[in-house]
Image: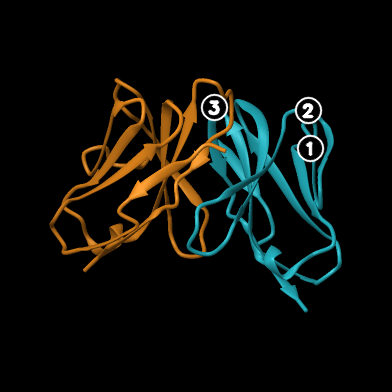
């Protein structure tokens, strides 16, 4: 099946710094990528949808200036958490959908962000 | 608006059958997913229903009634490794919107 990777898998940063998380589709071209966050024992919350070469569409309540998303190529999307605070600590998961799939999304393994 | 409801937790015994229900209200509905998620891992795809009816895939079956806004996931011959969260999710305007998930505990 299709493979999506995320890097890093875990990151610890200090308050006020920025952190970049990469999401890559390894064996297919991802026209659309999605970013989710998940708090402990809670479900995944969709943050934004990004299409290659265009601006991301953010869900209501998600600050676009704080969570910068770039989808510069068909295999890579990045999420940058700017000026991170402890409340940004969460599990961030990306998913990708290819041209050949009308609905199926393939999830990355997730990135655990801890802000101290 | 949108609303996806499923029980928070369920417990079942190894070898038994369990049914996890999900009700939803959402605009732009295209279909319904079920995902399995083990703690600290990404969700893995179980099923996708677009049309009404039951779809069986090995030990897992999924049912959808679009008119009732209702779905269920049926797990047979439960194994300890089935202990996980099961996420009901709607395909809404080509986005996947998740419910809060049901944590399933399997007892030996």
Report the residue marked by disc 2: B51
Marks 3 and 2 in Cβ contact (< 8 Å)? no
Q: Earlier in the sequence, mark 2 or mark 1?
A: 2
Q: Is residue B89 left or right of residue B13?
A: left
- Identify the chain drawn in cyan: B
Q: Earlier in the sequence, mark 3 or mark 2?
A: 2
The image position of residue A96, as x and y in percent, is 46, 34
Report the residue marked by disc 1: B64
Residues beneath discs 3 and 2 located on the same chain: yes
Q: Is residue A88 left or right of residue A27?
A: left
Against B91, is B3 above or below? below
The image position of residue A66, as x and y in percent, is 22, 44
* Chain A drawing hue: orange
**To which chain does the residue with label 3 belong?**
B
Quarter of the image with the N terminus of chain B is top right
Q: Is residue A60 visible?
A: no
Identity of the residue furthest to the left in this view: A16
Report the residue marked by disc 3: B94
């Amino acid at each position: 099946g299709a493979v999506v990777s995320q890097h890093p898998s875990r990151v610890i940063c200090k308050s006020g710094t920025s952190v970049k998380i990469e999401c890559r589709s390894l064996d297919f071209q991802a026209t659309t990528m999605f970013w989710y966050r998940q708090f402990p024992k809670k479900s995944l919350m969709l943050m934004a949808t990004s299409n290659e070469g265009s601006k991301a569409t953010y869900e209501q309540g998600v600050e676009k200036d704080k969570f910068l998303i770039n989808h510069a190529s068909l295999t890579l999307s990045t999420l940058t958490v700017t000026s991170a605070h402890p409340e940004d600590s969460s599990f961030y998961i990306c998913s990708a959908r290819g041209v050949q799939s009308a609905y199926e999304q393939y999830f990355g393994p997730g990135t655990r962000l801890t802000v101290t | 608006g949108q609303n996806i409801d499923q029980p928070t937790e369920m417990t079942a015994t190894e070898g038994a059958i369990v049914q996890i229900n999900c009700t939803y209200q959402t605009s732009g509905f295209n279909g319904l997913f079920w995902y399995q998620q083990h703690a600290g891992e990404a969700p893995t795809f179980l099923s996708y229903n677009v049309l009404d009816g039951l779809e069986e895939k090995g030990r897992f079956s999924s049912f959808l009634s679009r008119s009732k806004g209702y779905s269920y996931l049926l797990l047979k011959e439960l194994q300890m490794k089935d202990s996980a969260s099961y996420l009901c999710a709607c395909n809404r305007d080509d986005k996947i919107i998740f419910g809060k998930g049901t944590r399933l505990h399997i007892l030996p």
